[in-house]
Image (cartoon, rainbow, N blue to C red):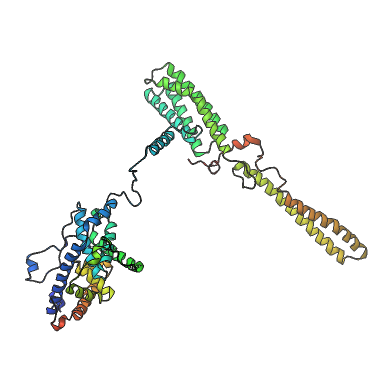
Amino acid sequence: MTDHTPHEGGYDNQERLLDQLLADHHDQLLHTVADALDARAGLAALKPLRHAQGPGLDVVVPVHESPEVAAWREAVDAQRLQMPRRPGSLAAVLQQFEQLTDLLACIRRAVPRATMVNVAALASSLVLVRLERGLAGRTLTRAGAHQLLAELEEWLGESVQAMAGAPSGPGHLARLVCAVESLPALHTLVMNLFEDAQAEVPPRHGQPACGPARAGRGDASEVGSRRRTGFCGALLMLVGVVAVFAVWAPEPLNGLAFLMTVPLAALGSRCLLLGGAVVDLETPSHVVPGGYGAAVSQPIPASCTGSSR
Amino acid sequence: MIGDMVMEQPPAPVGTEAQRQPRSRFPVVHRDDFDAFYVREMRAVTVFLMHQGATPYEAADSAHEAISKLLPDRWRTMEHPRAFLRLTAQRCYWRQNDARVCPADPVPDRPGGTCPVSEVVLTETQQRLLGALHELPPALRSVMAWHLDGFDYVEIAEALGMSLAAVRQNISRARRKLVTILGLGKGDADD
């Protein structure tokens, strides 16, 4: 019961008696408590915790599910499974690019290197990579995407023509022809991305404009506002000078100066009023210099589209 | 090495029975039998807390809560579950003591209304020894509870974050006080 050694001293009869008392007491108390405890109830209470996956992660399984609830749940699940993907979504486009890249890689592996088929497939793959990176990174403009898609169509056509007269892997030609036939639909999908991106940035008054095209308009209005403010300041300074002159000038000149002060002050106050109102009188904020084409040809900032990569 | 189920014993005095027959204070834990683990540790931790001043009901409540924190798998994977259990149970008891409200209503006159643990009947010797332990200052009482539960000085020092010398000194003081409280120095100890 103790770690005492003879070197520590003091281990006399009292200590020995105490050890004996405490040891007996501990054993008896253990038995008493063991008799009083209801281990079965305690274990039953802990049973749910023993099979838990973690705090708060228990899987709730409905014990009784009525037929109506079961039918409703199955209908919701089926609806969720059958829900078509958004046709213009970036993920769908990238998935098609990926499939096309895989097909081109298969074709390149199946044909010799120095053949026209291999070269055309390689060129198509490179165009696809540029398209994929540009769209995924949102660094591609609408015109750039259109140009790359046209280039891709051209190279894929070359590939089909070259493959028609050369041996290739089984079924590659048929799959490539299918891919070429689906290119117009893919083109539309990519263009829809830009349309959707534009549609997702509704023009609103009273909110800071986003995107490079808006930034240009905002800068011009700021420059104009600064110019007007400077003009008003200069006019007010002139009014002050003329007023001082009117007070201190000799007799014939001070009357003339006083007469000049009144129209100058009126002009200054009018300019001040107009300067405050000029912001509201400008063109609406959604009208972009350069028109719609200039707006969509700008890179789409990710913060404006609201869609995550 | 805190709270190992089977631990190396400190060197016993030369020529004693313990030296010739090395015994194991703690049973070997079978990590695949939670029921046995629960039964053994529940009563041990309950007694451990009773030595620290808890009533049987409070002690059993805290011990059960502490064991629940070892589920679902920590009781099996933890290296020193015994020390963890006692530290957790101790904290549960202290926290419980701050918030416990004694019910003012009478005990319901129906079967199952009272917990059997709260109705534990202690013998006079048990009450006397528990009373003596409760008279100790809290620090001495805590160290003594660990010591009575079979932990050696090194394990107590590691569990309570004390130096070995402090543990040794606390136990020595507690024992001297117990001898005084129980009147063992006068030769009238009641076995």
A118 left or right, relative to A253 = left
The x, y position of residue B27, in whole percent, is: 15, 59
Single out the residue that lies furthest toward the right. A252
| The image quarter in which residue A252 lies | bottom right
Q: Is residue B47 above or below residue B30?
A: below
Q: Nearer the viewer, residue A16 or B113?
A: B113
Single out the residue that lies furthest toward the bottom. B186
Q: Nearer the viewer, residue A274 or A199?
A: A199
Location of the C terminus of chain B (image quadrant): bottom left
Location of the N terminus of chain B (image quadrant): bottom left
Single out the residue that lies furthest toward the front. B109
Q: Is residue A248 above or below residue B131?
A: above
Q: Nearer the viewer, residue B5 or A164?
A: B5
Using the rendered image of the protein, determine whether residue B169 is visible from the camera's viewpoint: no
B169 left or right, relative to B92 = left
Residue at 31% over, 48% down? A53
Using the rendered image of the protein, determine whether residue A184 is visible from the camera's viewpoint: yes
Residue at 14% over, 70% down? A24
Residue at 26% over, 52% down? A47
Q: Is residue B108 above or below residue A168?
A: below
| The image quarter in which residue B111 lies | bottom left
B155 left or right, relative to B188 = right
